[in-house]
Image: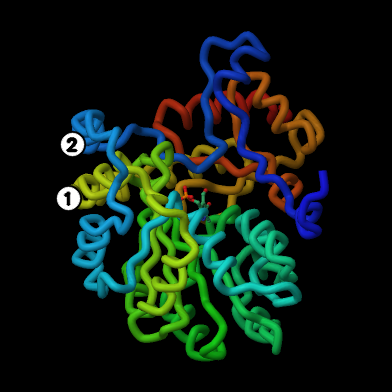
């Protein structure tokens, strides 16, 4: 077969190992998965009920414009509904933004390491990734600004950053956006926004209202526990929404996903409770890791980096050893951070299992 010439450079996305596979491979009764930054609990009960109640509508196409969900998002964020676009996960929206912005030879500036999909979105358009190393594991906005050149069409800032969990204050982002040329799209990927435990966690909302070239990406995959349904959204300007609308497939967001997301938004109190609980569990995880001598990186997301050097086995083997003992985490080497593991904030029980398995690897 002869495929498009850009295809050979597109890295396939490698998801974390599946619980079923690990349990069969090692003959384990209990496997804890802390690898994919998922929320450890199911969707809200009210959301589950809405999904179940909609089964009989599956013979109909869903609303191709996601009107109700877009209106609800617009109301929630005091944003014009003409600047809200919904996607089959925020991953789809990232790829669609690449489609409307990038041509062969264009440049995209983003941090290294950051979310792996950013490289893929460049490669499939024949665009060049211009990566800017993190400074102390945090976005180096000054260097990113310096990397914006004549061919730059897009800048992506992941906040909190995956895989480091580090957070940029909204004021720093606002100052950054002011300095980016107006014809360069600034995508602020806020997949983990709801886990941020600072006063300014909603302050970026004004950016797409002030700047036509700013897009905020958020998702129902994380705190709402809906990653299995695939629904994310962008808050942007009307021209960006119109551009994406031209290229997205018809009915890109399925009916159960639209209804579930709509219902999830009605339960802001439960979302805020999950936010508080995650912050508390994140603190406990960090304290427990410190107690067994593991370095960590302060995180504002629902995951955390944990140092894997200086254990009983070489750091390259820690990931596999933990997996063989029933804990799936993400090997930092696969994310551009050898010597680290990325660990999702699970339930209290899952944290205890992780700490117990990890402490067995700590030298006496
Ligand atoms: C930084 C970042 N952006 C976007 C996504 C994609 O989320 P969604 O499930 O909405 O496609 C993820 C998923 O892990 C992520 O880590």
In this rendering, position of residue 20 left or right of residue 321: left
**Residue 132 visible somewhere in the drawing:** yes
**Residue 196 visible somewhere in the drawing:** no
Residue at 69% of width from left, 27% of height from top?
A: 361
Q: Which corner quadrant holds the C terminus?
A: top right
Q: Which corner quadrant holds the N terminus?
A: top right
| Callout 2 touching callout 1 (CB < 8 Å) | yes
Closer to the camera in the image, 303 or 47: 47
Above or below: residue 264 compared with residue 56: below
Give the quadrant of residue 52: top left
Q: Which residue is mark 1?
A: 266
Mark 1 residue element: loop
Please tell me which of labels 2 and 1 falls first in the chain: 2
- Give the class, few, some or many, for how many residues have Cα within 10 Å of label 1's Cα (few <14, many ≥20): some
Q: Which residue is mark 2?
A: 46
Above or below: residue 94 compared with residue 259: below
Residue at 40% of width from left, 31% of height from top?
A: 348
Q: Which mark is residue 90?
A: none
Give the quadrant of residue 330: top right
């Amino acid at each position: 077969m002869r495929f498009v010439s850009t295809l050979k450079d597109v890295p396939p996305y490698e998801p974390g190992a599946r619980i079923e596979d690990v349990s069969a491979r090692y003959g384990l009764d209990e496997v804890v998965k802390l690898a994919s930054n998922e929320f450890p609990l199911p969707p809200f009960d009210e959301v589950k009920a809405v999904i179940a109640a909609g089964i009989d509508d599956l013979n109909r196409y869903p609303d191709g414009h996601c009107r109700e969900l877009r209106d609800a998002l617009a109301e929630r964020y005091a944003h014009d509904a003409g600047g809200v676009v919904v996607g089959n996960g925020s991953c789809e929206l990232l790829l669609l933004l690449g489609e409307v912005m990038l041509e062969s030879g264009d440049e995209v500036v983003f941090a290294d390491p950051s979310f792996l999909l950013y490289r893929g979105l460049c490669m499939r358009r024949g665009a060049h990734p211009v990566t800017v190393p993190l400074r102390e594991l945090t976005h180096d906005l000054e260097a990113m600004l310096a990397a914006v050149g004549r061919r730059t069409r897009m800048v992506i800032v992941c906040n909190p950053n995956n895989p480091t969990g580090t957070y940029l204050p909204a004021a720093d982002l606002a100052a950054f956006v002011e300095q980016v040329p107006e014809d360069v799209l600034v995508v602020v990927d806020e997949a983990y926004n709801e886990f941020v435990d600072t006063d300014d966690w909603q302050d970026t909302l004004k950016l797409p209202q002030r700047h036509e070239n700013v897009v905020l990406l958020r998702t129902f995959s994380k705190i709402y526990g809906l990653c299995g349904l695939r629904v994310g959204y962008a808050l942007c300007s009307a021209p960006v929404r119109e551009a994406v609308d031209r290229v997205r497939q018809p009915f890109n967001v399925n009916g159960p996903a639209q209804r579930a997301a709509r219902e999830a938004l009605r339960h802001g109190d439960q979302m805020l409770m999950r936010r508080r609980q995650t912050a508390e569990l994140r603190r406990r995880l960090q304290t427990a890791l410190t107690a067994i001598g593991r370095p960590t990186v302060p995180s504002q997301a629902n995951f955390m980096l944990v140092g894997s050097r200086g254990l009983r086995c070489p750091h390259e083997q820690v990931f596999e050893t933990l997996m063989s003992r029933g804990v799936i985490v993400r090997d930092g080497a696969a994310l551009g951070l050898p010597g680290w593991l990325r660990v999702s904030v699970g339930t209290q029980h899952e944290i205890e299992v992780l700490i117990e398995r990890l402490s067995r690897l700590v030298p006496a």
